[in-house]
Image (spheres, rainbow, N blue to C red):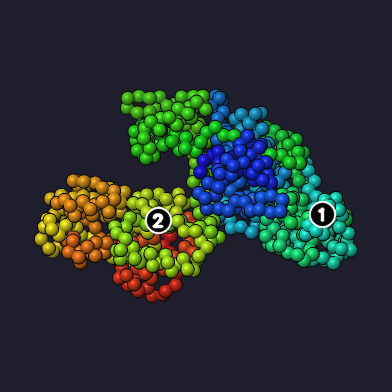
Amino acid sequence: MEIRQLSYFLLACQHKNHAEGAARSGLSASALSENLNLLERELGLTMFQRGPLGHYPTEAARWLYQAAEPILRLAEAAETILTLPVSQEIQRIEVRSPLQFMLGRLSRAASLAARELRRMHPEALATVSFADSASREASVHDLPAQQEPPPAGRVVLDYAESGGDGAFLFLDEWLCVTPAERFGDDERTVPFDMLRKLPLFVPSLAPAQLGQARAYCAAHDLPEPTVIEEDVGTFPKLSRDAAPFCLLAPQSLVAGGLARLNLGHARLPADLSSKVVARIDVDHPAARSYVSLLQAIVQDPDPVVLYEPKITLKQMRYFLTLCEQLNVTAAARKLHVVQPALSNQLRKLETVVGRKLFVRHRTGLEPTPDTRRLAELFTPAVEQADHIVFQAAHHAATRHQRLSIGFIPMINHDGPLVRAMTAALEEWGRTYPNVKLQISEAPTQTLHRWVESGAISFALVEAHVSRISQLDLNTSDAIGVVSSAAAELLPPGVVPLRRLTTLPLVLPGEAFGLRQILDRAADLRLTPQMEVNSLTMILALIRRMPLATVLPQHSVQPYVDAGILQFNPIVEPAISRRLSILFSASRTLTEIERSLIGIFRQNLALAGFTPPAASDSAPDDARQDHTPVH
């Protein structure tokens, strides 16, 4: 995921087809579509659906729009923030609204006003947030809490209360939404006699607006409307309902969805409207300027927000790692990139912001006064990008669209652990045939990082000390010295752990859970003759050379039984591998995740790894350990 992809996505959300959006940005329609397809595949989300008149954003897309826009706004601010005096602090202006985010006139005008504000007040950084659809889980869509000081100014966008306080923005007229064939003409007015015969609905709104709708119906002798839980951006049920109905709703809430679906609307026979105002809760000159800008911009009935970022997420991540390490070599090692690539990205970033960001010394890097200010913007942007990946994976799993999991490396394709895992996957796949399953294999340390970032939902790892939650699978697999039976490095029988210091060892690197278990048990740093990060290659080496390694017994038992390898259990102390499921404590496991873990447990027991479970059911929340292992 990159910032430019997010900017293309925001642009596509505001147009009825990709060709229109591409023309606005100077891209070809195919290039825009390709970037959007890549973003959809990476996040596992369905972001657009087709209607009779074009495509329209799904609920997931409206969440992603709100989650992605702060990253773009921070990137834009970073391009000019270093032109301010170092002594001038960033003034944060918070713009909030309890109104639902529908990609309409108000939300787009609010974004444009936030960008224009920086021209008038370069030191001001406005954040804009609307409420998500009431039908969606708050845990999935809440933005991560930022440890920030109180804002210098705060503006609230809402319908006017009875006192009519706040700066007037526009009148939000209520409409009657109904099947398109009944009212195809936008100027058509529905008579009261027809309304009295139709089922009347209202979407889930704030109490004040629900009260306004009910009072209108009572004053005009209409039946009391029924509140329905319908997403007013996609109308998943009403757009397929052939029976006549009328949904009473404010125009700003439904206009975007109606333009792309098989629904029409008509005016009400008597005026019903809600006054939208901007109220300053915390006064500041920049907050007052924001309201004035918003009043002017909101008069445009169809504003378009177009971000054209020059800074990339990769540059942000590289910069923050350099700030942490203050050494190019150490930063490149942590990022798993070569030094020239890291230096090249830093030069590009310095070109965009127009400043040198580090002073280079023989001993390392020294931050400049501008470095802290840039890090102040980049840190929340990168955190928000990580949050998007994490929550998108949970969203896809919750809706049975995609599940991404990880495994520690397996030694051979026919071992008992592999057989147990493949049998579990086959059984689970019959229950959830439409879920796209993505499986990644990596060392334990890498799997930890992927779980923490949300790249995968959970991972099968060796149980050990962790900052995140683990679900113990109650396994026990003896660890011992493995060597070629023909080499006769050791006599049959047990081997004291201290004997390993005298053996010609080939071991996996420190990122592997097996190596971490061994190093902790030995209470010293073993120095192998070879360090190879491939278990398959390690087996090949010990079969050809006078070398030994350390592996769990189950993984090599078929070779031991065939007389190819020799296994010597380690004693003094005895060491065993226990398996666990690693997952994030910041959310609960979904139904499809619990089901797969439950089937894993059953098949591990059948393979002899674990005792039979007391219950064959999948683990529920009560059986999850959400406390980090210490």
Whether residue 212 sits left or right of residue 96 in the image: it is right
Q: Which residue is mark 2?
A: 406
Question: Foreground: 248 or 138?
Answer: 248
Residue at 51% across / 61% down in the picture? Answer: 435
Residue at 32% across / 27% down in the picture? Answer: 363
Q: Is residue 376 above or below residue 362?
A: below
Q: Say what secondary structure mark 2 lies in.
A: strand
Rounded to the nearest whole Å, what is the CA distance between mark 2 and mark 1?
A: 52 Å
Question: Foreground: 26 or 39?
Answer: 26
Residue 200: quarter of image: bottom right
Instruction: Check residue 184 in the rendering and tell me which mark sits there, or answer none.
Output: 1
Residue 549: quarter of image: bottom left
Whether residue 554 sits left or right of residue 545 in the image: it is right
Q: Is residue 346 above or below residue 305?
A: above
Instruction: Check residue 552 in the rendering and tell me which mark sits there, or answer none.
Output: none
Q: Residue 264: x, y in percent?
A: 78, 55
* Residue 170 shows in this picture: yes
Mark 2 is on which residue type? Gly
Q: Residue 31: x, y in percent?
A: 57, 40
Q: Residue 452: x, y in percent?
A: 43, 51
Mark 1 is on which residue type? Gly
